[in-house]
Structures are given as structure tokens and as C-alpha cells.
Image (tube, rainbow, N blue to C red):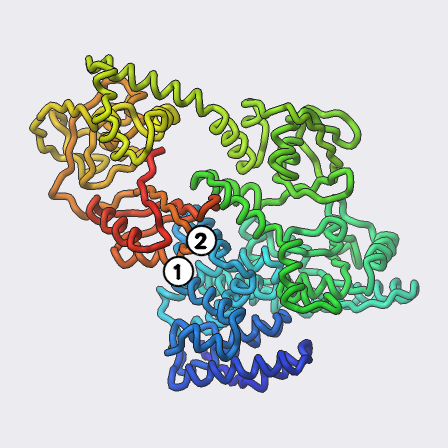
Amino acid sequence: MAHTKDTITFDDVLKCVKTYITDKEELSNIKRAYSLAEKKHNGQYRKSGEAYIIHPLNVAKILTEIHADSETLQAGLLHDVLEDCDCTEEEMEEVVGRVVTNLVDGVTKLAKLHFSTENEYLIEYYKKIIVGMSEDVRVIIVKLADRLHNMRTLWALPREKQIKKANESMEILAPLAHHLGIHKIKSELEDLALRYLKPDIFYDIAEKLNKTKLERDNTVFLMMDEVKNILTEHNINFEMKGRSKSIYSIYNKLDKGKKFSEIYDLLAMRILVSTKQECYLALGLIHAKYRPMPRRFKDYIAMPKPNMYQSLHTTVFGIDGLLFEIQIRTHEMDAIAENGVASHWSYKENKDGAVSLQTATEQKLQFFKSIIDLSNDGMSSEDFVNSVKNEVLNNNIYCFTPKGDVIELPTGATPLDFAYKIHTRVGETTVGALVNNSIQPLDYELQDNDIVKIITNKSSSPSKEWVNIVKSTAVRNKIKGYFTRSERDIYVERGRDLLEKELRKRKLAINGFFSEENCKRIFKEFKVGSLEEIYLEVGNGKNAPNSVINIIDKQKEEVIPKKVTITKGDASIIVSGLSKVKVNIANCCNPVYGDEVIGYITKGNGISIHRTTCHNLSMLDNRMVEVKWNDNSNNTKYLSMLLIYSNSLENHIADIVGKASKIGISIDSIYNMYQSDGLEYNVSCYVTSIKQLDKMFLELKKESYITEVERLIR
């Protein structure tokens, strides 16, 4: 395949900028950013052989096509300078200011992450990491433009890297572009990714489109001519254009079993009018002339998509009975549909662009708000991923408060989900609900456009049954959290009973065990300040009774393990007295090589290996067996779950990932949760031994912002 090199200049970019930015100071700032980029990239070349400055110029050009603001354009020109050039943040700030430098720093941090698309869990986590690290949405916009140009020049890389970049673009970045509403970038990223991932299919579709193009164009032209006459006759000012289907969207439909001839929205047109009222008037006129296809009408003007997309969609039986897909929207809606949040600011008159962009983001970018809300709820890894898939990425429903405020909810949501979405306190005091002025039970399944009024009682509190009623995982966790808080006394009492029961079982005197000297040792080991806290941690399952008692009384038989060959399961474990047995590492406490471990004989699933401190052991019967690590097996990697506590609200995900990478630890997932005094990071990683894990602990504790690191036992 022949490839031509880009011949873009700064003048080309500036010409595009001036079509929508006219302020002299902003234009001067963009020129200053380019001068710094040109100076710092001087003498650098890309893999394609061209001068490096060509890349940031193309990134800036892509950003102009979605009408990005001045600061975003400056960041696009400078996005590689901090990472690849001899330039400090202080030096950059002197030239372009703090805001642009922060944007460039954000893009630089994202560039240090190595994404994996091995499974959908990782894909969702990396989407979340990108969101979590990008406090300003413009960081992601620059990242998308950067990736789009890299995809356009992907031919210069080896095949292996082409596949990796194409997968990242398809699975992680194109969906983010979609949820930002940037159709231009999303569509091209998908097409380019498909071209490298499935070239045969890509070129086959492209060839079929070319063969049928003339016939389609003629049919669409005739249909457009008829519609134009209808609109002109009723004095509606409009602009009309045919709409081409992307190769990837056609591939998607073919992949779902459709034939090429059945993809009827290949015949498509878009009508642009001046006002919202004219959208509905045009729709009515078209439906009066052409019969609409049932269940194919969508009103995204009254009910916009979370990414701000607004339009009327209808499919009608047009010329020769052929199906035509028609979109009707205003010029402003069209710009936002194509360019997303990046261009929203330019339609706000008499407002500063950056402020308006931020306002638009805060008000309308429900996807980001939903993701960040989820990350603050402290849910488990599995819960988070399920929430993203089922409650954020899927089609949601939209209900109204009696005042007309729109509440976005997952499909299948109940009045309780609605109540908690308004405010946690409203949810906790809910006693009933009126849906469309009719009393409905709290487990009633809400529908699109329902008007919901929540009835509350200040003296009321949640019921445990609510956990099984609500649809939203975040709400479910809030309800569970309520009972965790309110049942502290129950947990303390349960913990006392469990400890005393285990002490009696070991024939140890309770009063003697809890002597002042023994308590000091226990408190120091578990980093608590009172016996009540020990009871609480045992009662809520954080620590097992045995792990507390073993601090003072270690009763262990010396057993010489018999070395055996394991035919299935984990070959890094040696079982005493047993051979050819299936062995599994328990996922509740995730032991790693070097931990003190014990085996539990399960029913039908071999031996489950636990850390001796695993609280779940107290709930198991006595089917224990001595096990030890096989010192000859040192290449295995073990999953470990960490909790990292910080005293800072600044996001340090990139730093934590970097430290793990230097030690050779692979991060599987990482997300943060906001606490009152700082961020808490939940990390899932793969390590080779307890020594490697200890090294990670030491490295992390060197940082002033980290207050504590601990391993998690579920």
C-alpha cells in the first residue's frame, strides 16, 4: 500500500482556527504555543520519516475540525513536549500559562499508561482510569485527537504494534469519543481500527459500497428532491445532505446476521433547520407524505442522549417503497452531534469559552458523572464493572420529578433507585411513591417518561429487603453501607462471641488471654486502639478469630510435608500426605508465594489454599490439611488485592502504576474512592512472591501522600 506523508504547515492550522476563533489574544496564544513546540521538537523525527512537528500540527488540525477551544488547541500542539523533549512544567507555564500546562501534564500521564484489551473487565477499568485521571475533560479530547492521527499513520509501525493500537482504539478510545459525543473522531477511529484488525472484511465492504454508490446516490437524490419541495412549499429554511454510513457500522450489522442488501439505512439523509419547532414541523410534513416504519421513530430532542446528542430519527417508506432513514435537527444540534462537548462552548453567546465548556460538561456529560460517582462508592471490582456495563454504557431510561427535572436511571430501575438518585437522605427516608399520580409499590419497574413523586418520613429508615429491590449497584451499596454503620454494636457483640468461642475451643482462659500485656501485643499487630475495635473487625469479617488468638497462642503441629507432583491445579503448592490432587488458590485472601498458608479440603473441587490469617477459615469446618510452597516453582504470578490509603485528594494513579511497573508487578486494575481525608486506592495486581509485595509496600510508603498500605481479605 502506498502512503503519502503529511505536508501540513502551521499556516494551514491557523487558517482553520480563524474560521471560528477571531479573538486576537487567543490567536496570539496559539502562535506562542506552536513556537515552543517547534523549538522543542526541532531535530526529532517520526517512524514515518517526517519531522516530528508534523504530528502535533495534525493533532491541532483534527481539534479545529471539532471546534476545540484555544487552550485545547495549545495543549494539542504541545502534548508531547513534556514527555519527549527537554522542557519542564515551569518553563512551559511561563510561555502558555498554568491551565494549558495542566492539560499537557494530564495527556502526558495518560501516555504513560499501557492499556490492555485482553478481556472486557480490563477494558472497562482502563476507560475508568482515563476518566479518573482526567479532571478536565479536554485532556481526553486531546488524547483522542492524538490517537486519531497516530491511527492514520499506523502503516509505519510493525504489524504487532498495529494490532495493539487498533485494539486499544476500538475497545477503549472510540467508546470514550462516543460518550463525549464526538462522532467524527469516533467513526474514523472505528473504521481505521477495523482496517488493521480485519482488513479482508474492511476492503470487502468498501468495495461493495463503491459498486452500489451510483445507484444509491441517484435514489437518495430523487428522494431529497421530493422532500425539498415539501419543505420549500411550507416556507421552512433548511439545509439537506445525504448521509454516508461508516464501514464499521455496516460491519456491525453484517456481524449480527444482516445481509448487505438488508441494511436499509444506507439510504439516509439529514435535514438541518433553524429552530426546534421547525424540526417537529418538518417531521410532521414528511410523515404526512411518507408512511413511517413502526417503532423506528426516536425523539432525542425532547430526551437527549447522555452525550448531549439531540435529533429526530425516523425511517419512512420513500421512493419505490424503499426505506429511508431521515434525521432532523437544528444546525447547533448537528455541530454538537458531530463534534460533541468540544464544540459546545462556541454556541454559548457572551460567555467565556472555557467556562462555558466546563458548564456544559458539568450539566450534560452524564457518562463522566456516572463513572466518577461509581468510583466514589467504594464498590468491589466486579460490582464496578457490572455497573459500568449495565448502568452507564447501556441504554438508560429517563424519568421526571414533579417539577420536570430529568433523572437518568438504569433500565429496570424502581422508585427506590429514583429516590436515592435525588439524594441519599431522600432514599433512606422513603416510605412510598406516586408514579404518574398513582400509588405504586417500591419494587415497581419504572418506564421512560414516568413522573415520579417520592413520599418520605423523617423518622423512617431503610429495610434490608431493599437490597433485592433496587437495580443500581451504587444504590445497593449505599443501602448495605447504612446497615454496616447501624449494626456496629451487633458486629462488636458477634466478634466477642466468636473470639470467646474459639478461646474455649482451645481451652484458654478468657480473662487471662485478654491481659493488659496480651492486649498491647494484639493492638500493635492489628493497628487498633481498643478491644472493641478488635471485636468489630472479627464480627464484620475483616479478621478471623484464629488470626487474633495466634498472636498470643500459636499451636501448630510440625508436619514434614511429602513432596508430590501436582497433575492439575497450582504446581507451586506441596500437600502433606496427598498426591495427585487438584489445588486452587483461594480468591478471598489471595495468598502469594512466601505467605503462611493452610489447605481446606473442599467438596468436589480439590484443596483450596488460604492464608492462615483468612477470616473465612473460622466459618469452615475442620477439613484442614498442612500445605507448603514448592521452592522449585518460582515463575508463577499470584493475584493480590491491596488497599492504599492517602492523605491527599490529588489523583496519584499514574504514580502508583509507575512504581509497580518498576518493581515488575503487573497492575490488573486500580480505582480510587474519595474519603473525607484523602483518596483510597483499590489495587488488583500480580506478584511473584511476598518479598516482591513487601518491596512494593516499602516503595509506596516512601511517598508522603501515602499513610498506609494493606492487603485485602474479602
Residue 603 position by quadrant: top left
Q: How far apart are marks 1 and 2 (CA)?
A: 9 Å
Badges 1 and 2: C-beta atoms under 8 Å apart?
Answer: yes
Quarter residue 211 falls in: bottom right
- At 50% from the left and 41% from the top, the residue drawn is 377
Kindly identify the residue that appears in the image at 40 percent across and 66 percent down.
162
Looking at the image, the residue that sits furthest to the left is 560
Point out residue 204 in the picture as x, y percentages from the top left corner.
Answer: 52, 63
Q: Nearer the viewer, residue 217 or 136?
A: 136
Q: How crowded is mark 1: few (under 14 residues within 10 Å), some or many (20 or more)?
A: some
Give 522 or 117, whichever is nearer the viewer.
Answer: 522
Up the image or down, 140 lies above or below 155; here it is above
Instruction: Classify the position of the C terminus by image quarter.
Output: top left
List the residue tagged with mark 1.
Answer: 113
Question: Which amino acid, by three-letter code, is at mark 1?
Answer: Leu
Q: Is mark 1 on a helix, strand or loop?
A: loop
Task: Return the x and y of residue 397 as percentages of the image width and height.
Answer: 67, 41
- Name the residue tied to disc 2: 126
Query: Which label sits on residue 510?
Result: none
**What is the three-letter code of the residue carrying label 2?**
Tyr
